[in-house]
Image: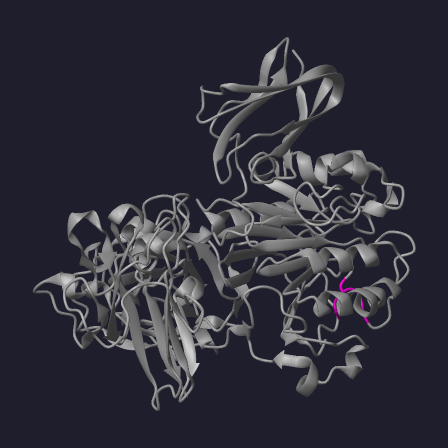
Amino acid sequence: MPQVLRGPYLQIGTPTSIVVRWRTDVPTDSVVTIGPSVGNLNTSISDGTVTTEHEVLVQGLIPETFYFYGIGDSVHGTLAGNDPDHVFKTAPPVGSKRRTRLWVIGDSGSGNNNARGVRDGYAAFAGATHTDLWLMLGDNAYPNGTDSQYQTAVFQNMYETMLRRTALWSTFGNHDAHSANSATQTGVYFDVFTLPTSGQAGGIPSGTEAYYSFDWANIHFVCLDSAGPAIGPNHPMVPWLQADLASTTQDWIIAFWHHPPYTKGTHDSDTETRLITMRTVFMPILESFGVDLVLTGHSHVYERSMLIDSHYGPSSTFDINTMALDSGSGISNLGEAYRKSGPGPVPHDGTVAVVNGASGTAGSGSLNHPIMIRSLSKLGSVVIDVEDQQLDLKYLDRDGGIQDLFTIVKGGVSPVVTTRIPLPTAANWSFEDTNTDLGTAWRQPGFDDSGWNTGNGPLGFGSSLVQTTVSSGSSGSVPPTTYFRTTFVLDGQPSEVEYMALSALYDDGFIAYLNGQEVARSDSMGTGTVGFNTLATNHGATGYETFVLTPAALPLLQQGTNVLAVEVHQRSLSSSDLVWDGSLVVDGRFHFLGPCAAGTVTSNGEPFSTLLVNGTDGGLGRSVDVGINQPVTLDVLQPPGNPAPAHFSISGFLGTPTAAHVFTLPLGLGDLCFPTALAGPVVAPLSFLLADNFGNPGALLPSTTAPYSFTNPVGLPFPFTFTFQGLIETGGGGIGLTNAVRLHIVP
C-alpha cells in the first residue's frame, strides 16, 4: 500500500476550482474524490500520470461551498481523507462583500516549538471560524529551503491541519533562494508550490510563479518577488505590476512580499539594498494605484505603521505632517479607525505597512522607525478579517493573545467595533481576605458579595505592582486562598462572540469562573480538585498571561451582566506576596442588530441594499458619518427582479434601536430594527414616517416609488443619530425589508 509522505495540501483556490497536491513513497497515478459529506464522495477526478508528486486540478465547483475530499490512486483507492478533517471551502464570487478570514505567517521556517506555538496561538484564537486563505511571507524553511527542511518546517508535525483545509499562497524569501532561482523558476520552492501564472485566479497573467496576483471576494492580492536577481526599476515585474493594478476594480488591494520597505528590527530599511529598492521602486507604484495594506517579513519582529503615503526616503526624511494621513492608533474601540475614500482603490489615499517576521523566531533591533505605531520583539502571526468596506488586522502572540490591532474603513461608513474590552485592567474588584473557606457558593452569579471590600487592580500585598492591599494574615499564616469577584457587561449577542480571552497577572496560582463555571486555571494549580487549603505548585506569571476561554466559555456568556469570580492560591503559608489583576477581551462580528439590519437578500444570499444614505449602505456597520450642516441624500433603489417601479415605505427612528425595538413582521416578512406603519399597536419612541404608500400616503417624501432620491442640501445643525429602515415591493408582488442605515451627524 503506498504511503502518503506529504499533504494533502491545497493551492490556487478560486470560486470554481482548487489544486490538490500530495507526495507518496512510490509512484502511482492520482485520484481525488470530492462530495458534500463524509462517505458521500460522489465525484472523481483522475490524472493517469504515474508519479510520487501528485497535483490534481479540481474544477466545476460551486462558489462558497464546503467539499469533503479524499486522495489516492486507481488501484488502492483512498489513501487519505474521506473524513471530517479533509474539507475545503471554495472562494466566494469575485467582488462579493462576504467576510474573508486570512492567516498570515512570516519567516516561520524554524521547524521548532516556536513555530508550533504560533500555530497553536492562532488556532486558539480562531476556534471554529473557518480560515479562508493563508499567506506565507517567505523564508518558509530554514536555513536553505531544501526539500527536507520544507518537510520539517511546513509539512510534518507542523501545519498539516491547515494545509488540508485552506489554500496556501506564498512569496519567495532570501532563504528560499538558497535552493531556488526565481528568474528561472527552478529549485525546491518552485517544486513545492503551485502558484498562478496565467491569471487563473484573477488579475493579469504574470507568466511566472515568482510574482502573481489573485482575487478573493472583494480583495485583490498582489505577490511580489523581492528576493530574486536584478530586482529594480528595469525588472519585468514593474510593467506587469502597473498593468495588473490598473485592471482591478476590487474594493481592497493587499500586497505582500518578503523584504520590508520600512523596518528597524533585525534588519534596517535605511541601509539594505533590497529593502531600499522595494521602498523606492515599488511603493510609489502601489500607492499610485491605491494599495491599502502591505505585508512583509524578513525582519524577525512585528512592526505596524500609521496610515502613510509618499514616504520613499530614509527614515530620517519622514515628515509626519505631510506623509502621515492619519497618525492615530487605528483602533476602532478608541474611536481612531483609519478612514479612507472608496469603495474601490483611490490613489494615494493611505497605506498601512506591516512587518510580520516573527512566526518562527523573534529578534530585536532599535524598533524605532518613525512611521511605526507598534513595534514588538515577540513571536506571533497576523490575522485579518475583511468584510464589505471594513478591514480588521490583529497581531496574535503564541498564547492567542491580541498584541496589536487596527481597523480601516472606506466610503464614509462608521466602523463596527469587532474587538471589545468589557473588563479592562485595573478594574474594580470585590475581595474576601479573611482566611475563611467559602466553599463553592461564592462563584455563582447570585452570590451576595455586598459585604466584601473593594478596590482596583492589581490587588494583593508585598509587590510594587499592587494598587489595592488585601490582608496578608498573621505572621507565618498567610491565607492559602483569597477570593475576588467582579462583573462585566456584554453589549452584543453571545452568539456573535468568536473569541474571548482572560489576561491575568497572578501570584502564585488562580482558578477563574464565569457565571459559576470554571473557564481557566494557571498551570501552578494542576488539574485535580482544588480546595481552600490547596497550595499552588510554583510562582505565578512575571507579567500578564493570556488564557483563551473560547470555545468552552461561549455557552456561559449572557447578554448584559456577567460575573467573573477568581480564587488566588498561595504557594506557601509563609509567602511574602500575592497579586491579582485580570482583563477580558472579546472579538466577533458585532453587527448592528444582526440580520434585521441587512434587509432583502438576493438569490445567492448576498444582501442587496435598497436604501442608501449619501450613496452608501453604511458598510459592515450599516452606519454613515456626516458633518454638521453637510448635505444628506437618501436614495431608494429598485430591487432586483422587480419589473416596475417599486412602492416603498421608509421610517425614521431618532437614536440607535436596541434589541427591544426589533419587531417581527407578519406573514414571514422578517424583522425590522424598529416598527413601521404595519407594526400596528407597537410604537417605537420618537419614530416617524418619511414615506408610506402601504397605509398612510402623503408622508414627508414627495414620492413613494423607486428608484428615488431626495437631498437635504443644508444638512442638520446639531449632532444626533437617526436610523432609517422600511419596506419595499420585490419581484413577483412580494414585500421585503430594506436594509437599515444609521446616520450620525458629527461635529
Is residue 566 highlighted in magenta? no
Is 727 in front, or is 388? Answer: 727
Instruction: Please identify the quadrant where the N terminus is shown.
Output: top right
- Say which residue appears at 54% left-offset and 45% top-offset: 132
Q: Is residue 744 above or below residue 707?
A: below
Q: Is residue 286 above or below residue 439?
A: below
Q: Residue furthest front?
A: 644
Is 503 displayed left or right of 314 in the figure? left
- Say which residue appears at 82% left-offset and 58% top-offset: 239
Q: How many marks?
A: 0
- Say which residue appears at 50% left-offset and 28% top-offset: 68
Q: Is residue 387 above or below residue 465?
A: above
Q: How is the image coloured?
A: one colour
Instruction: Please identify the quadrant where the C terminus is shown.
Output: bottom left
Residue bounds of the magenta highlight: 260-269
Dividing the picture into quadrants, the one containing residue 243 is: bottom right
> Is residue 582 in sight in this rendering?
no
Is 133 in front, or is 700? Answer: 700
Q: Characterize the magenta stretch by its predominant secondary structure.
A: loop
Dividing the picture into quadrants, the one containing residue 311 is: bottom right
**Residue 38 position within the rendered picture, expressed as x and y whole percent measured from the top left:** 45, 23
**Residue 427 position within the rendered picture, expressed as x and y whole percent measured from the top left:** 36, 74
Q: Residue furthest left?
A: 681
- Say which residue appears at 21% left-offset and 61% top-offset: 662
> Is residue 544 in sight in this rendering?
yes
**Residue 300 position within the rendered picture, expressed as x and y whole percent measured from the top left:** 72, 60
Q: Residue furthest bottom?
A: 717
**Residue 409 position within the rendered picture, expressed as x and y whole percent measured from the top left:** 51, 68
Is 441 displayed left or right of 582 in the figure? left
Is 644 displayed left or right of 193 in the figure? left
